[in-house]
Amino acid sequence: MSTYTQLFGKQVTFVTSDPSNPTVGQMWYNSTSKVLKFLGTTTSGAWAAGGNLGTARRYLAGCGTQTSGLAFGGTTTANSASTEEYDGTSWTGGGNLGTARAFLGGAGTQTSALGFGGYTTTPVASTEEYDGTSWTSGGNMGTARYGLGGAGTQTSALGFGGSVPPVLTATEEYDGTSWTSGGNLATARFYLGSAGTQTSALAFGGATATAPTTATEEYDGTSWTSGGNLGTTRRALGGAGTQTLALAFGGSVPPSTTPSAATEAYNGTSWTADTAMSTARNSLAGAGTQPAALAFGGFTTAVSAATEEFTGAGAPVTKTVTAS
């Protein structure tokens, strides 16, 4: 039988506080709390409550990571220009959008974000760029639209689907200055989920002109091809992650508009059910990765400020060793 030292090349260490950056499998004895601990991994995903948004809203956009997220736009009783920044614990106010709008697309990071399209009193084509402090105007989209998907970065973004009306298949690519046409979606849709980058994007769920859809499509920088269908038909859902490691959550399941808590994980081929959100909601925003996602805002029975943080299966977690 192998010993701990043979497996990990070190002895169990005695420390007065838990190590700040342990490796999976590492074990230590905390002499302050008088417990033996090790770093293992989670066996299933889980949602946990985060800090509430300062402004409850739905049909907002989001981008960034679980510990450095950005929320902007949306609507409460009126369209909002509010921007908020998340640090992994709480939201604080950022610079307002130049144009208050809802149903917009988002891409990028907390300090280098892009907001585009959306709805004021009509669909809009305007684009705004965020530098971590303030928003400035970028190049207009070729087609004004709302309820669209977004992916990528501030200088390499993708906008797709949405509605004028009619509901669109049109895809546009942003280079940091202007938008140009990309390959069309196979299924025209709006209020869809999205993830990924400009050259490796994912579109899933949403609604066509007649009904919600489970369809998933993958973009390679030129054209869209079919991926595995969602297990649950829904629209107005949130999304996070990459084309081969995505997360879909919330939304509304037809024929009802009742909010859903359903969560599904995508592996580049198929979707599988994961742990449901704590708060069922639709018209929410998402950010982050599949193993570390962020969901915020939306609608339950009222406009919501709730934030939830997702930890995916296989994520590192500190565990206490108990004797039996």
Image (cartoon, rainbow, N blue to C red):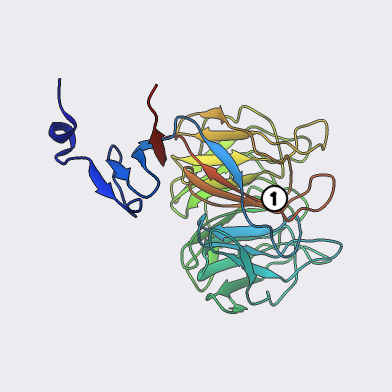
Q: Residue 301, percent across and down?
A: 84, 45
Which residue is label 1 attached to? 284
Quarter in which the C terminus is drawn: top left
* Spot occupied by residue 200 in the image (x, y as percentages of width and height): 44, 48
Position of the N terminus, as image quadrant, is top left
Whether 129 is drawn above or below 203: the answer is below
- Residue that protrudes farthest toward the right in the picture: 77
* Res 139 seen here: no
Q: Amino acid at mark 1?
A: Leu
Residue at image coords 54%, 63%: 87
The image position of residue 293, as x and y in percent, is: 53, 48
Secondary-structure class at tag 1 = loop
Classify residue 37 as left or right of residue 182.
left
Q: Camera-side residue: 67 or 197? A: 67
* Image height of 77 relative to 243, above or below: below
Q: Position of residue 154 (x, y in %)?
A: 50, 67
* Front residue of 271 and 20: 20
